[in-house]
Image (spheres, rainbow, N blue to C red):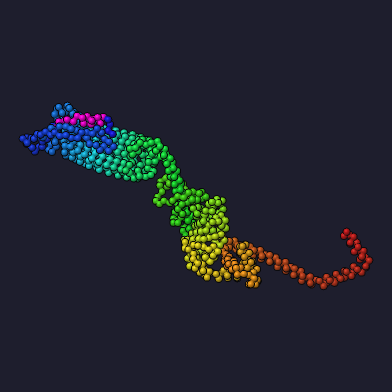
């Protein structure tokens, strides 16, 4: 709103409207006798009492009787305006020339005391011929055809400048108008706010209905209290928080779609009234709550009074949104840390496989099929968060700078899937998993882990996650069919997924049939997403059935029993015990049972020994061989010595026998002496 003193000025102009204007107009080409004089009296609309509303789109006029006299002029084509002495006394400080069909500003002589000048609703294209009116404080050029702001440099006292509804494309040439209080430029073609930072006394600025796409360059307008930006193309707002006195801001009917584009408004402590109606943001469900929460000092929003209940609800909703935002931020951090960890695990795996040279750890490798929603990261359970495309915001990027990328494994639970990345993740199977989490897991995925290492933890997997039915292997070095034998020790497997990446075994044409044959007791339903049919089972049996028979029949019984589990040992002994019975003593049902048990037992002989276990066994065998060799050498040495002693005894025995006989004869030759000697020996022994 225009200050009260300007409203009173316009009010007086509206009340004292019977003013006779005497215009004397003459061009230099007219002779003296061509002088024409006429009087024009007409009624025009009265001034409006309100000079400037939110858009400053107002019309005002005054009624006056104009006595126009065309006279000679020294400047061609410019009318010269002259008033009588009585008119100057009656309306000494104001002059209204609205709706006069003027195309230029007339020359106004002897009116240096004018304070209010009105050129509304004409066809003026340029501001001129008013530089002598240095006391002018109110200039109204509303609804003309002005294309450039000019000719105002001498009007240092001007306080109100109304240039609405013209053709102005740029704000310029206002450097000397430092006393401006009101500037109305609505309804023009302005695309940028500029050249106004020196207007430190400006209180009202109207730029409605222009071509503005953004708001900035407002620094320096320290007295501005009202800013009207309705009906533009604004998408974001800046610098408004630097206006210490701004109270009313009108942004209706623009292209503002997010609060972030106008977030500077939250830092303004003086704003009390604001409008966003007609913007995309006003259609959002969170619009009102977000605005009120971030701008607690508002008294009016979209021309409606803000109630305490609305503030309370806005506070509650804002707290929930803040919690959601923090959680989202946390999930984004976890998701990015997960990505970095997987990249690091993949790099380490490639180094182990000699695929790439040792490179710097900050070079990322993308993992295309990494799960989107981390729910457990290094033992910490987190809720699911949908992966978003696009770059991370600056705050998240800053937070990620502190993340470690040296982690060598990752464990996560996403819904019913347990994903293990890196060999270190296998240690998580020793963790005390909750019954609920362990029972929920039905799918276990292994990535960047040697299959031989996985084999060693399969018994733990069977115990910790009893409901696991689906196994996935990617980059696990599955290279031969017999490795699938190790999966037989699990409780149950319904689905098996072998990713071709890092698993050369899938290049074998018959690998699926071998899996079906070896794991037939699981009655698998899918392999690599493909349903298993009865024909597949029959083909698997035809291709590999003889293999199990050969494996079980050619092995010695002691060797066969040693490689079977306890349950299969009992089955095998049962088979051996029933071989000698007559066929008639066993019914048909038992025969079928024996046949099935035999098949399972035959398959059980097809085991897999890991390389590490084989190496350990090899070392053990070497030690045993060494011990056996030493033991046999000792036995041979001892036997040799015994044999040598025996041979020596055989040579000495005849002579020894003769001597023994001779000694015996000598001793018993004197019978009484011999008896006494024997009795004496017996007595000595007692």
**Hey, which residue is sitting farthest right in the picture?**
672
The residue range painted magenta reads 5-21
Q: Main secondary structure of the magenta part?
A: helix
Q: Position of residue 14 (x, y in %)?
A: 21, 31
* Res. 346 in view: yes
In the picture, which quadrant includes the C terminus?
Answer: bottom right
In the displayed structure, 16 sits above or below 458; it is above
Tell me what residue is drawn at x 27 percent, y 44 percent: 211
Q: Position of residue 377 (x, y in %)?
A: 50, 50
Based on the displayed image, in which of its 4 quarters is residue 251 positioned?
top left
Q: Is residue 667 left or right of residue 500?
A: right
In the picture, which quadrant includes the N terminus?
Answer: top left
Name the one closer to the observer, 495 or 141.
495
* Res. 202 in view: no
Q: Is residue 175 left or right of residue 571?
A: left
Q: Is residue 195 left or right of residue 471?
A: left
Question: Does 263 lie within the magenta span?
Answer: no
Question: Does 13 lie within the magenta span?
Answer: yes
Q: Is residue 317 left or right of residue 576?
A: left
Based on the displayed image, in which of its 4 quarters is residue 586 positioned?
bottom right
Q: Position of residue 409 (x, y in %)?
A: 51, 53
Tell me what residue is drawn at x 55 percent, y 71 percent: 546
- Disc tally is 0
Name the one closer to the observer, 539 or 587.
587
């Amino acid at each position: 709103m225009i200050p009260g003193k300007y409203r009173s000025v316009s009010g007086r102009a509206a009340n004292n409207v019977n003013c006779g204007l005497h215009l004397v107009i003459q061009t230099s080409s007219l002779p003296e006798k061509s002088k024409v004089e006429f009087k024009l009296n007409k009624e025009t609309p009265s001034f409006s009492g309100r000079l400037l509303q939110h858009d400053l789109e107002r019309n005002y006029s005054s009624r006056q009787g104009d006595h126009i006299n065309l006279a000679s002029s020294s400047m061609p084509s410019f009318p010269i305006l002259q008033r009588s002495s009585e008119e100057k006394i009656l309306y000494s400080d104001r002059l209204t020339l609205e709706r006069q069909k003027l195309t230029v500003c007339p020359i106004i002589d002897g009116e240096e005391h004018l304070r209010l000048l009105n050129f509304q609703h004409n066809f003026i294209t340029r501001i001129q011929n008013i530089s002598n009116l240095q006391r002018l404080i109110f200039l109204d050029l509303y609804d003309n055809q002005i294309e450039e702001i000019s000719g105002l440099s001498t009007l240092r006292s001007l306080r109100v400048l109304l240039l609405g509804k013209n053709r102005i494309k740029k704000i310029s040439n206002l450097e000397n108008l430092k006393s401006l209080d009101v500037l109305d430029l609505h309804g023009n073609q302005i695309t940028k706010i500029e050249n106004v930072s020196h207007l430190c006394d400006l209180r009202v600025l109207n730029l409605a209905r222009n071509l503005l796409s953004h708001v900035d360059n407002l620094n320096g307008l320290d007295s501005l209290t009202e800013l009207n930006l309705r009906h533009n193309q604004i998408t974001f707002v800046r610098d408004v928080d630097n206006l210490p006195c701004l109270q009313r801001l009108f942004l209706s009917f623009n292209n503002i779609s997010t609060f972030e584009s106008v977030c500077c408004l939250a830092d303004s402590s003086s704003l009390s009234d604001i409008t966003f109606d007609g913007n995309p943001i006003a259609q959002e469900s969170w619009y009102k709550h977000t605005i009120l929460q971030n701008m607690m000092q508002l008294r009016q929003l979209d021309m409606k009074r803000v109630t305490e209940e609305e503030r309370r609800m806005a506070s509650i909703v804002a707290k929930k949104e803040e919690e959601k935002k923090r959680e989202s931020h946390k999930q984004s951090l976890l998701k990015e840390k997960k990505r970095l960890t997987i990249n690091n695990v993949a790099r380490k795996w490639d180094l182990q496989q000699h695929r790439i040279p040792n490179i710097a750890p900050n070079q990322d490798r993308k993992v295309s099929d990494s799960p989107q929603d981390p729910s457990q990261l290094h033992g910490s359970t987190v809720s699911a968060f949908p992966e978003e495309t696009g770059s991370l915001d600056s705050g998240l990027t800053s937070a990620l700078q502190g993340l470690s990328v040296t982690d060598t494994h990752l464990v996560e639970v996403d819904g019913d899937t347990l994903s293990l990345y890196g060999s270190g993740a296998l240690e998580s199977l020793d963790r005390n998993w909750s019954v609920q989490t362990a029972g929920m897991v039905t799918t276990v995925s292994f990535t960047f882990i040697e299959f031989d290492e996985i084999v060693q933890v399969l018994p733990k997997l069977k115990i910790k996650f009893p409901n696991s039915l689906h196994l996935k292997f990617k980059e696990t070095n599955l290279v031969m069919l017999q490795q699938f034998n190790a999966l037989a020790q699990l409780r149950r497997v319904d689905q098996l997924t072998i990713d071709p990446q890092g698993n050369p075994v899938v290049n074998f044409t018959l690998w699926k049939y071998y899996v079906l044959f070896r794991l037939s007791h699981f009655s698998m339903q899918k392999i690599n997403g493909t349903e298993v049919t009865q024909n597949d089972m029959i083909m698997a049996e035809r291709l590999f059935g003889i293999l199990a028979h050969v494996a079980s029949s050619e092995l010695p019984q002691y060797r066969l029993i040693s490689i079977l589990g306890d349950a299969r040992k009992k089955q095998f002994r049962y088979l051996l015990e029933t071989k000698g019975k007559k066929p008639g003593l066993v019914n048909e049902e038992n025969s079928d049972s024996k046949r099935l048990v035999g098949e399972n037992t035959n398959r059980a002989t097809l085991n897999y020994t890991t390389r590490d276990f084989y190496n350990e066994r090899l070392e053990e065998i070497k030690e045993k061989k060494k011990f056996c060799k030493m033991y046999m050498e000792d036995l041979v040495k001892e036997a040799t010595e015994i044999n040598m002693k025996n041979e020596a005894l055989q040579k000495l025995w005849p002579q020894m026998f003769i001597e023994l006989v001779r000694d015996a004869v000598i001793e018993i030759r004197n019978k009484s002496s011999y008896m006494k000697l024997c009795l004496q020996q017996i007595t000595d022994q007692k």
